Structure formats: structure tokens, C-alpha cells
Image (cartoon, rainbow, N blue to C red):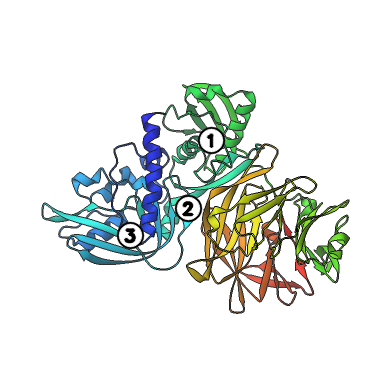
């Protein structure tokens, strides 16, 4: 491993500690470093931003508070490696402050107080943090986040001698100068799997996208996905210029270790990851300036249901099947079997050819030709059914364990160490089969709910072998938890309850959640496998569909609405 790579690894580990300290109400000290700035974030300080911020430097005679506020404001501009922001720092500290170590995003209200002599504290209402690799996580509501600054008098003027690593931006500024893009890695069966990253919105964004692909998956997903790009491959030219719509990617000789099949996977990763980069339609792969391969940007593989399976299904008047024109049509093959079980929850396979059914204290797998009981433990919740045919069941009688069963074959218990004693209300496997989401009550705040998302490690045949040791909190939302479902492989929806109101919130992995209105008495929802098929059911059997910013009552007398996957 090169000295540069060692420094980058150390920086990423330091970043995790730094942001946890910031968010945990502890004063943050600047962390001097001697290695190079992380490739992905530094490169974008070399070009002009589409949105320009031109903050001024420190005013003569400025107070310590003025210096802090000016410094925070100036960090909105990364021009010339944050040159204006560095003017607020003491000369000996200016080179040590590292803005590449992430972003703390706040609501915009910042209270300043003097903590002690030559020490000030800025209190923030933080809503998210972005690490040095561009991964965003929401910050839980509650007490203010406090960050610490130290000062010295330099030539009769106050300057900062210690500040939080990374930068602080309010949400509107952050959204103006940073943008979310999808990077793509590979599952065990070589399907493309997305990973949302935030990048400075600059002309050199192609360099950062390729740089992050070369860095590989995040720590959480390292056992879930992989990159086809041979280990040790780096940018030979240090940048990815875009010429007439073609991104020229000049890589080191390690790329030549890829055989023909691997090279096709490399091209798929690059083509999908570059599809959202402005003005890029094609790419060329070079090694030491010699053209090796070329390709076009492509849409990623989709796990969405095919057109013939795009419908909402439910149970009404003892019949189970697609809901259309105000009625339910029996689903061929399995609809009658499901209805006979008198289900309390149903999850259909993505192809609608089989189902996992919760009924009378058990979960059964139903197909046109068979019916198999897969779990009889008590306190079961709605099951999941992944694209490989595995039924996922959770019982609060066996906390912290997920039972995964391939009907007619074997069962496996997967550990969920990140639950930490919390009781899931809903557990759902994403359509791609690479992530699992869990809706729980926040242990510290019973009136708050949150969604945890972990990765699923599988072997090449699709058999789940483990859940990741890390689960990211992808959503904090007020109210007690009611239900959760995936809309597609990147988006999910949750229902929480405050009094009689069922609040619907839509989340996107690695992005900000969106409040999606209220359905009084909401008891369950279905993502449907497509955003247009999102449905909410209330406690009187009324089914609601989204309309504008609200919900429209669509049908009455529905006993349950099915989930997919």
C-alpha cells in the first residue's frame, strides 16, 4: 500500500471520530494532518462553481464572534482551496485546517457564546453530516450541536487557532453548492447497486466520481458490494477531463490486469456512475495515455417490476388480487390460496408469482403449486420476500435475529447487532436484495421513530450469509412507528403516528427526507415497487393514493394492502 493510500485511510477513520464528536455535543478541535487532502473532495477546489459565493475576508477590528461567523460564511466558497475562509485562521493553523473532512449541515440558526477566555462555542441545529467520501446521514433531533473555536491575537486582530475539521453549511447553501449523484458497485451476482454520494457542484465533478469509484465501497458496504476495477488502480493523470461530451479516464497499468469479462463490468460501473454527470455522454479508458476501451453512459439495471406486474394488490370481501376500477380481481395462481389463509399481512414476490403470508401466528410461503409454513414463532411481523425467493421473518420473541428461509431448502439465522435492544415494528428487504430497513422507536426519545438500514451480504447464488455490523440511520421522524416499506431500491416510505394522525415520510438513501402529508388513522402502507403505486390504508379500510402534496381516498372496504418484496 502506498504512503498516499495509508494517509487517505487514516483520514477516513479520523473523519468518523470527528463528526461523532461534533454531533455528540462535544467541542471539536481542529485535527492537524500532514498527508494529502482526500482525492475526491480536494479536486473540486480547482474549478469554478456553477453557483458562486463571494464572501469577504475578516474586517479590521472584528470581534471573536464576528471572526467565527465570517469563517463559517466564507466556507461556502471553496475557490482556491477555501482561500477566503483561511484568512480567518492564524497563519500557523491555516494549513492544518482541513475542509475536505466533511460537512455539518444545519438549519441556519447559530447561537454564539464565549465559553472561556479566547474560546468560543457555536450552537447549531444540525440536521445532517456528510463524511469525507460524500456519504450523508441525518442527525437526530434534540439538543443543539456545539462546536468549539479557539483564538489568538495576531498583529492586533483576532484569528482562529483551532476549529472543527470540515465545514459548516446551512441546508439551503449546502443544496446550492453540493449535489447528490449515484455511484454504482456490483452485487455478488454482478447486478449494479447504487450508493448515493454528495459532490461539490463543480465542472470537475467527473474527476470526483471516478476517484470515488477507484476508492471502492464504503466501510458499511464493503462486504455487500464490490468493484470490478482492479485493486491499486489510480488516476494516472490526476483528473478526468471532459472533451466534446467524452470523459477521458487515464488510469494506471493495474487496469490491464482485468480480463475481457471484468473489463465489461468495469465499463458498466463507469457508464452507470457517469450518467448523471453533466455534459458526459461517453467515456474513454486509457492506460498511460493509450486508448484501451470506450463506452457510453447507461441507465443502471433496474429491479422494478415489469409493466404487467405494476399494480396494487389487496384483500377485499374475501378475495385477494389486483385492485382496479374500485374492485379486487382474484390473482391467478395464488390469490385464492392467500385469501383462504385469512391473512393479516401479505408480501408478493416482485414477479407476483408467489407470496409470504402472515396468518394466525405463522408465516407461510404460497406458490401456485405449494404452501409451506416457514415460521411459527410468536410475535411475528409482516414478512419480506426477496428476489431470490427467500422469506425473511422477524419475531420479537427472538430479538436481534432474522430468520431467512428458502422454502423446501434451509433456514438461516442472521444477527442484527445494531438493533441494540430496540423492537422493530417493520422489517423490509429492498427489491435489489442488498439492503434491509428496520423501523423502530428511538431508544432515547419514545416520541421519535427512526429507520435503520444495513447491508445484506450474499454468496454468488444469492443466499444471504450475514447482515453488516453497521446500520446507518437514514430517517428520524416524529411520532410512534406504524409501518415501513421500500418504494424501490433507493427510496422508502414510513408512517408514524402522533395522536390520530398518520404522518407519511418518504426517504431516499443518503439524501434528505420529504414529508408527504397526513392520512388520519393510517395503519399500514405499501411501496408497491414503484413510486406511483404508493398506498396508505387507514383503520376503517379506506385506501389512499398520493395526489399532489396530499392523499386522495381511492377505495373502501380493504382488509389489507399487499407489499412487494
* Residue located 61% across and 63% down the image: 424
Cα separation, mark 2 vs mark 1, equals: 29 Å
Cα separation, mark 2 vs mark 3, equals: 20 Å
x then y, percent, for residue 19: 39, 53
Which residue position is annotated with label 1?
245
Q: Which of the pair 5/240 is nearer the observer?
A: 5
* Classed neighbour count for the residue bearing mark 3: other residues with Cα under 10 Å, few (<14), some (14–19), many (≥20): few
Instruction: Identify the element where label 3 is drawn.
Output: loop
x then y, percent, for residue 377: 71, 61
Q: Earlier in the sequence, mark 2 or mark 1?
A: 2
Which residue position is annotated with label 2?
136
Q: Which of the labelled discs sits on residue 47, or is there none?
A: none
* Classed neighbour count for the residue bearing mark 2: other residues with Cα under 10 Å, few (<14), some (14–19), many (≥20): many
Q: Earlier in the sequence, mark 2 or mark 3?
A: 3
Q: Is residue 47 visible?
A: no
Which residue position is annotated with label 3?
26
556 left or right of 4?
Answer: right
Q: Nearer the viewer, mark 2 or mark 3?
A: 3
Amino acid at each position: 500500500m502506498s504512503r498516499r493510500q495509508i494517509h487517505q485511510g487514516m483520514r477516513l477513520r479520523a473523519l468518523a471520530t470527528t463528526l461523532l464528536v461534533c454531533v455528540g455535543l462535544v467541542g471539536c478541535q481542529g485535527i492537524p494532518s500532514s498527508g494529502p487532502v482526500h482525492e475526491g473532495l480536494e479536486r473540486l477546489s480547482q474549478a469554478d462553481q456553477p453557483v458562486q459565493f463571494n464572501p469577504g475576508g475578516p474586517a479590521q477590528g472584528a470581534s471573536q464572534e464576528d471572526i467565527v461567523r465570517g469563517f463559517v460564511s466564507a466556507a461556502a466558497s471553496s475557490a482556491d482551496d477555501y482561500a477566503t475562509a483561511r484568512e480567518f485562521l492564524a497563519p500557523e493553523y491555516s494549513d492544518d485546517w482541513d475542509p475536505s473532512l466533511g460537512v455539518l449541515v444545519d438549519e441556519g440558526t447559530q447561537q454564539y457564546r464565549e465559553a472561556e477566555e479566547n474560546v468560543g462555542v457555536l450552537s447549531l441545529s444540525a440536521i445532517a453530516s456528510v463524511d469525507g467520501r460524500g456519504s450523508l446521514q441525518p442527525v437526530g433531533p434534540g439538543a443543539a450541536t456545539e462546536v468549539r473555536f479557539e483564538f489568538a491575537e495576531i498583529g492586533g486582530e483576532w484569528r482562529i487557532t483551532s476549529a472543527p475539521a470540515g465545514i459548516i453549511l446551512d441546508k439551503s447553501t449546502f443544496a446550492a453548492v453540493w449535489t447528490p449523484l449515484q455511484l454504482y458497485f456490483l452485487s455478488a451476482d454482478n447486478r449494479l447497486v447504487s450508493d448515493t454520494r454528495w459532490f461539490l457542484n463543480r465542472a470537475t465533478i467527473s474527476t470526483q466520481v471516478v476517484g470515488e469509484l477507484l476508492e471502492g465501497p464504503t466501510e458499511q458496504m464493503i462486504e455487500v458490494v464490490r468493484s470490478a476495477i482492479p485493486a491499486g488502480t489510480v488516476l494516472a493523470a490526476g483528473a478526468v477531463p471532459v472533451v466534446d461530451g467524452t470523459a477521458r479516464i487515464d488510469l494506471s497499468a493495474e487496469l490491464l490486469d482485468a480480463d475481457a469479462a471484468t473489463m465489461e463490468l468495469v465499463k458498466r460501473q463507469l457508464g452507470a456512475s457517469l450518467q448523471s454527470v453533466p455534459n458526459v455522454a461517453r467515456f474513454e479508458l486509457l492506460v498511460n495515455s493509450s486508448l484501451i476501451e470506450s463506452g457510453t453512459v447507461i441507465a443502471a439495471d433496474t429491479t422494478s417490476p415489469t409493466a404487467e406486474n405494476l399494480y396494487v394488490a389487496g384483500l377485499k370481501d374475501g378475495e385477494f388480487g389486483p385492485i382496479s376500477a374500485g374492485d379486487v380481481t382474484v390473482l391467478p395462481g395464488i390469490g385464492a390460496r392467500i385469501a383462504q389463509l385469512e391473512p393479516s399481512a401479505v408480501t408478493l414476490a416482485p414477479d407476483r408469482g408467489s407470496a409470504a403470508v402472515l396468518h394466525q401466528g405463522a408465516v407461510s410461503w404460497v406458490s401456485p403449486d405449494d404452501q409451506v409454513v416457514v415460521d411459527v414463532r410468536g410475535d411475528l411481523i409482516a414478512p419480506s420476500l426477496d428476489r431470490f425467493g427467500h422469506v425473511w421473518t422477524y419475531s420479537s420473541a427472538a430479538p436481534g435475529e432474522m430468520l431467512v428461509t428458502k422454502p423446501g431448502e434451509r433456514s438461516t439465522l442472521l444477527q442484527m447487532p445494531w438493533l441494540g435492544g430496540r423492537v422493530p415494528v417493520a422489517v423490509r428487504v429492498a427489491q435489489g436484495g442488498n439492503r434491509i430497513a428496520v423501523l423502530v422507536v428511538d431508544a432515547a426519545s419514545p416520541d421519535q421513530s427512526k429507520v435503520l438500514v444495513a447491508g445484506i451480504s450474499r454468496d454468488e447464488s444469492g443466499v444471504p450469509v450475514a447482515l453488516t455490523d453497521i446500520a446507518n440511520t437514514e430517517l428520524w421522524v416524529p411520532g410512534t412507528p406504524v409501518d415501513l416499506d421500500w418504494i424501490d431500491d433507493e427510496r422508502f416510505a414510513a408512517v408514524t403516528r402522533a395522536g390520530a394522525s398518520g404522518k407519511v415520510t418518504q426517504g431516499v438513501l443518503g439524501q434528505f427526507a420529504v414529508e408527504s402529508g397526513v392520512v388520519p388513522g393510517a395503519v399500514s402502507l405499501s411501496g408497491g415497487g414503484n413510486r406511483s403505486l404508493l398506498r396508505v390504508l387507514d383503520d376503517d379500510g379506506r385506501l389512499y393514493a398520493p395526489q399532489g402534496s396530499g392523499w386522495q381516498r381511492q377505495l373502501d372496504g380493504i382488509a389489507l394492502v399487499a407489499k412487494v418484496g
